[in-house]
């Protein structure tokens, strides 16, 4: 039996990544980008976990279906972990403005001190809103000095993966979706989700 899982997001890049990473599961994915009137949950939590839980519960209760919610972002050590939970709206603008701000804030920071990580917390809730599974994933890297690459979204053009010597935006989706913070969290969720859904 094919089950439906709603992805509690309007971010097309994030939705595409979830669908590609979990493509082998016998589930049909829909997202809040496809539904008029879907809730826009205020991301006012102090952690990725808090925001993801809030989105999963609100989304499941609205849709009456199994719902997957992700809250994720970039933590830069030289900036005390910022932008963190404020990653997507850090500059008050979009991705380009966020990347401009990151480069400006790290202008005088040398390469060894430009360590950072992407972190994702993903939660799955059943139709009643009860949380049935959650997991966190991280991907370590460095912040580059200029944008490189055209794939991905967010801070991908600046996030250098040391093992590859390239930014996430240069690696392309196939590699990104094997090594990213989101891929690691989703891989950890695969077994409990299959068990809970009975697929």
Image: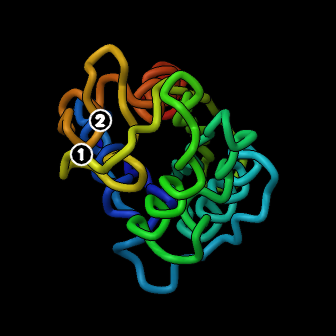
- In this rendering, the answer to whether 111 lies above or below 52 is above
The residue carrying mark 2 is: 167
| Res 17 quadrant in image | top left
Residue positioned most to the right? 46
Quadrant in which the C terminus appears: top left
Q: Is residue 94 left or right of residue 123?
A: left
Q: Are marks 2 and 1 in contact (CB under 8 Å)?
A: yes
Residue 38 vertical placement versus 79 (above, below): below
Badge 1 density bin: few <14, some 14–19, many ≥20, Cα 10 Å: some
- Percent x, y for residue 151? 20, 48
Residue at (30% x, 24% y) in the render:
178
Q: From mark 2 to mark 1, how far is it between C-alphas?
A: 6 Å
Q: Is residue 52 visible?
A: no
Mark 2 or mark 1, earlier in chain: 1
The secondary element bearing badge 2 is classed as: strand
**Which residue is at the far top?**
163
The local crowd at label 2, few if under 14, some if 14 to 19, many if 20 or more residues have their Cα within 10 Å, is many
Task: Name the residue tied to disc 1.
Answer: 148
- Circle 1 — which element? loop
| Nearer to the camera, 37 or 95 | 95
Residue lying at the far front in this picture: please name it: 108
């Amino acid at each position: 039996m094919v089950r439906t899982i709603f992805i509690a997001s309007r971010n097309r890049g994030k939705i595409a990544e979830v669908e590609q990473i979990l493509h082998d599961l016998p589930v049909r994915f829909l997202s809040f980008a496809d539904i008029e009137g879907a809730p826009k949950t205020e991301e006012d939590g102090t952690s990725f976990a808090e925001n993801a839980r809030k989105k999963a519960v609100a989304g499941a209760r609205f849709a009456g279906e199994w719902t997957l919610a992700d809250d994720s972002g970039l933590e830069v050590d030289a900036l005390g972990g910022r932008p963190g939970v404020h990653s997507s709206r850090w500059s008050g603008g979009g991705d380009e403005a966020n990347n401009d701000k990151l480069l400006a804030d790290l202008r005088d920071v040398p390469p060894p001190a430009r360590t950072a990580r992407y972190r994702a917390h993903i939660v799955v809730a059943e139709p009643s809103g009860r949380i049935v599974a959650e997991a966190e994933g991280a991907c370590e890297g460095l912040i580059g000095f200029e944008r490189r690459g055209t794939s991905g979204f967010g801070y991908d053009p600046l996030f250098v993966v040391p093992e590859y010597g390239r930014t996430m935006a240069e690696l392309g989706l196939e590699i990104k979706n094997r090594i990213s913070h989101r891929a690691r969290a989703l891989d950890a969720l695969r077994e409990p989700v299959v068990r809970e859904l009975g697929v």
